[in-house]
Amino acid sequence: MTTGGGAALVRRLDGSTRATLLELLFDVVFVAALAQTSTLLADQESWTRIPTVLLMLTAIWWTWSVTSTTTEFYDPQQRPIQVILMVAMVGSVGMAASLPMVTRAQATVFALAYVGTHVVRGIILVSTLYRQQHRSAIARATRFLFWFLVSGVLWIVGVLADTARWWIWATAIAIDLLSAAARYPTPWLGRVPLDQFDRTTAHLGERYQQFVILALGDIILVPTLELGRSEFDRLRIAALLCAFAIMLLLWQIYVYQAGELLETAAASATGRSTRIAPYTHLVLLVGVLVTAASFDLVVDRPSGTTPVRWLTLIIGGPLVFVLGRALFAYLLSGRVPWGRVASQLLPLLLLPWAGGWPPVLVTAIVALALAMHVLFPRGGRETRRGLGPRRPAG
């Protein structure tokens, strides 16, 4: 199967599971793209472009997720993998810069940045592994490259078709997500073997946790920048404090529950956790970005009435995050803490009257509901044996 030092590029299971400094820099670059996405979401005056913003967010997230899977299966200390990380950073910058998507040139840059990142990664992996004669790894990289070439055609066609661009791009990203869920079935090569998912180490769980924590910082970054451009007053400061409280509460929900589920599942259901993490964490990320966008608006105008679109962002962001966490727990363990999830119904129950309240008050109610979620007594096991959060030693 492997000859001539063929395993040099593939990560050793007994090697270090810590993220490298280049991987952390890679995360920071992508979080900058997410900050641009949340700002763009806040700037939308109607619902018509919201789906397009979410589509672009999905493309950015999928680029991060697939690249992080690459550094999990392959050794990030090796020069080809470092080059792949650098190419992905350039692609992230290109996608972030073209996010407004006002001109056809921006659409072209976005599509080329997305497709180029995935195709270049595949070419580097296949060529390097071919020289090393690592047959199973070549087959894996070829499967990924094949499906990104298939979707890449639609991404480029979408640039040329102005009228139906978003439908074509939606089909392209759907191909990317569904082909991954089906384990990249490829002619003459079949699917990615399940045992390749089972070999995942704690490194991947740490990577997801690091990225989500960095993304949560966007909730406080965006309103802080907005406050710096505005006049200081008590309501704006109160809105910023609500943003800080919600950021900490979401952090606690993730780190002490869903994040540790991902890490500790490595011992008993690694393949499943590895396969579902990209999709469930996309839901979490949408919640973070919507929450950040809502505070960009609230800090700018904390008083007066709250428009329906604002209500949707303020209440919907944390709700989507909590539902994403519950979905992740359910797919791993078959159990959901319904008692604590039900605490998110409080803002929904007040929705008929919340439109006449100031935005800062609505955000305070959302923070209270999240606090109830965190403080709700744990009335039993949320996960089956082997999947629960680790207990501290001693």
Image: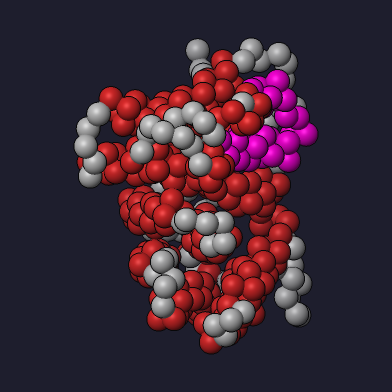
**Quadrant position of the N terminus in the picture:** bottom right
As drawn, is 105 to the left or to the right of 269? left
Q: Quadrant of residue 370?
A: top right
Q: Nearer the viewer, residue 281 or 140?
A: 281
Q: What residue is drawn where x is 74% and y is 67%?
A: 191
As drawn, is 341 to the left or to the right of 32? right
Q: Nearer the viewer, residue 269 or 355?
A: 355
The percent position of residue 250, horizontal first and vertical second, equals 50, 31
Q: Is residue 225 above or below residue 132?
A: above
Span highlighted in magenta in the image: 315-344
Q: Does the stretch in magenta take in 130?
A: no
Q: Main secondary structure of the magenta part?
A: helix
Q: What residue is drawn where x is 71% and y is 55%?
A: 195
The percent position of residue 306, horizontal first and vertical second, equals 48, 37
Q: What residue is drawn where x is 49% and y is 28%?
A: 357
Q: What residue is drawn where x is 54% and y is 82%?
A: 162
The percent position of residue 344, horizontal first and vertical second, equals 62, 27
Q: Is residue 145 above or below residue 303?
A: below
Q: Does the stretch in magenta take in 318?
A: yes
